[in-house]
Amino acid sequence: MTGPFTRADLDEVAALVVSSWGSGVDRDWTVPAGTLSWSCAKTADHTVDAVLAVAIFLASRKQDGYPDWGWGEFSMGADPRPDDLVEALGTVTRILSAVIAAAEPGAGAVIWRRPRVVARPAADFAARGALELILHGHDVCAGLGVEFEPPAALSLRLSDHTRDWPHWTNPGWSAPRATGDPWSDLLMGAGRRRTR
């Protein structure tokens, strides 16, 4: 077992995704994102929303459910520019990192609500946001034909930290296996495959 997945690890994943997406801003973002049916632009837009949502969940400190403010999905519109998506992703990941850093000792919130509502400490929100970042970062890069290869140690810490989380029981997902290639394990566990 490796050490916990940390806020510094989240920052590293964010920098990697932002850099990789940034290298592909001149490519066609209307193509499917890897094996997904969504386009690269729609997947990127969803990723921005998903990471921001994780920050809002923790900032709320709610213990019985997600914040119920009547707001829906944060979206950058029907035809967002790729460079705006890259900038937005960098912004929301810094927001999530700052919310984690500002959390007082013992702070936590609901981190997921399926199959049941579960509250976790602030430190777990780094891994929660990183799952969205790393998997959808891969999806967009696969669609764009951009190299995306997280460091093995980073992938292993994320896999180990989240191994008992219910995400790995979603249809088409399974707990990552230890094959000696942590990035491939993480992708295969989430129903994806390496593109190179």
Image (tube, grey):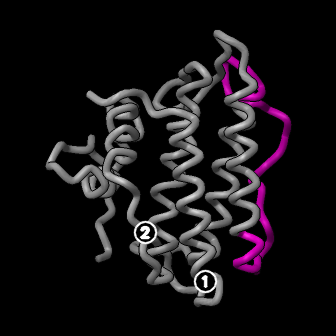
Amino acid type at image mark 2: Phe
Any magenta on residue 81?
yes
Local packing at callout 1 (Cα closer than 10 Å; few below 14, some 14-19, many 20+) is: many
Name the residue: 70% across, 58% down: 90
- Residue 40 placement (x, y as % from top left): 57, 76
Any magenta on residue 29?
no
Q: Dot 2 lies on which element?
A: loop
Q: Dot 1 lies on which element?
A: loop
- Main secondary structure of the magenta stretch: loop
Placement of 188 over or under 112, stated as above or below: below
Placement of 54 over or under 184, stated as above or below: above
Can residue 172 be seen at all in this image of the molecule?
no
The residues tagged by marks 1 and 2 sit, at their Cα atoms, a distance apart of: 16 Å
Tell me the quadrant of the picture where the N terminus can be found.
top left
Name the residue: 58% across, 79% down: 23
Quarter holding residue 59: top right
Q: Nearer the viewer, mark 1 or mark 2?
A: 2
Placement of 107 over or under 42, stated as above or below: above
Which residue is denoted by mark 2 in the rendering? Answer: 148
Q: Which residues are magenta?
A: 58-85
140 or 90, nearer to the observer? 90
Q: As drawn, is 158 to the left or to the right of 29? A: left
The number of discs equals: 2
- Residue 77 placement (x, y as % from top left): 80, 71
Which residue is denoted by mark 1 in the rendering? Answer: 29
Local packing at callout 2 (Cα closer than 10 Å; few below 14, some 14-19, many 20+) is: many
- Residue 118 placement (x, y as % from top left): 54, 21
128 or 73, nearer to the observer? 128
Outermost residue on the top side: it is: 106
105 or 74, nearer to the observer? 105
